[in-house]
Image (cartoon, helix red, strand yellow):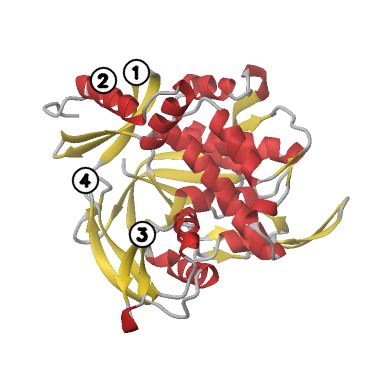
Amino acid sequence: MTGAYIECFEGVDNERLLGAWFDLGLPENEWRSYMGKIGVHENDLAVQRMKVKGIAATSACIYPFKLHGSMNLSDMEKIIDNWELPQIVKEKSKLFFQHWGAAEAVVRDTNPSLIPFDQENFAEILCYTVGNILAWHLIGEPECYVSTINLGSGWNQYDEGWKVFPEPATVQLLLGYPTLTSGAAGGITSTAAAALIRTLAVPAPQSAFITEKVGYGAGPEYASTNILRIQLGEWYTSSQTVKSSNPQKGTIVIETNIDDMNPELAGYLIQRLLSIGAMDAYIIPIIMKKGRPGLQLRVACKTERQKEIQEEIVRQTTTIGMRHYTVSGWAVPHKIVQVNTSFGELPVKIAFLDGEIVNVAPEYEACRQVAESLGISGKRVYQTVLGEALAQYPFTSKQ
């Protein structure tokens, strides 16, 4: 199974998403083991089968720990970094908050680092976010695609005053995604779920889907719109099945030459572009007209991210224009596996060609963290992990 098709005909929230992953056969014991390491224990989770509008579905409710005080984006990332989770789960969880912070910053006209997170509410959001991304990881990290997303509409009154739906940050997060407002009262797509969709999924292609397994997630019983469906399977066209094992995807490359920007800003620029969805971003030193040294920025992204990335380049640099063109890409299938090493369990990327292992590479960030914590060289950690990984995944083996 190469894809997960998330259908949001009644909107989407993190509770229904988690329920759907459980319904698809999430390895619950392993999931609970990881969640216990971050403070979500046996009695903090309620999973039950139920019927919603005559459809059997799974409800998964987390009753999280409490946090106190004020937090910002950096605080959230530090909490996630300190948790004992697979590296890909940490990275995606941090990306979730980066997306949310960037959207709130646009809405409030401020810097993402200054966005305050209310800890009483965000403890729950943090647990559901990590829980969903961990579930996606344990299911097999399928490529996620999302249907047209029903956002709901209208106004509701809360203790703090009136609130419009969909919320402004929700709309900002889903720029480039197909959405609709059905007239359903209230915000049937939460801002947290919108950030999760942006982190894990892209808009679904306009082609047929061959379904192999279906899962339904249920929301609160009191909600009028409270079911979500995830289908696992493959996308199909008249000429081929779209498989992640041999993807050939069209992408957009955006280029611009800059000769009047402080080069100290270049590192932050690359980090920002990658955080909002660029597939790759790098800078090449060039000599421009009149012999002036300059920088050529080159960014690869999916078509649906083009507008957002172009606008971010304009905001972050001094350029007033850029060129873009379509290219094709190809990649061999690969996956992240957890390898038992002398330094504990660490993530290693394994690449395959026709089922044969052709590359084994420890994840840099995990090796860096181990080296810093032990006060030894990164080279020593990397080479040790590589050798132990090759012993378990030799080039001659097939998977």
Q: Nearer the viewer, residue 186 or 274?
A: 274
Front label number (1 vs 4): 1
Quick check: marks 2 and 4 in contact, CB under 8 Å? no
Q: Residue furthest front?
A: 291
Of callouts 2 and 1, which one flags the residue occurring earlier in the amino acid sequence? 1
Earlier in the chain: of badge 1 and badge 4, it is 4
Secondary structure category for the residue under label 4: loop
Q: Which residue is mark 4?
A: 332
Disc 3 or 4, which lies upstream in sequence? 3
Say which amino acid is labelled 2.
Glu
What residue lies at 46% left-to-right and 44% top-to-bottom? 230
Q: Which residue is mark 2?
A: 388
Q: Earlier in the sequence, mark 2 or mark 4?
A: 4
Residue 346 in the image: x percent, y percent?
A: 38, 25
Callout 2–callout 1 Cβ contact below 8 Å: yes
- Report which quarter residue 94 is drawn in: top right
- The three-letter amino acid code for the residue at tag 1 is Asn
| Between discs 1 and 3, the one toward the N terminus | 3
- x and y percentages locating residue 248 in the rendered image: 23, 57
On screen, residue 365 above or below 239: above
Q: Residues within 10 Å of mark 2 (few under 14, many from 20)?
A: some
**What's under tag 3, amino acid-wise?**
Tyr
Which numbered tag is attached to residue 282? 3
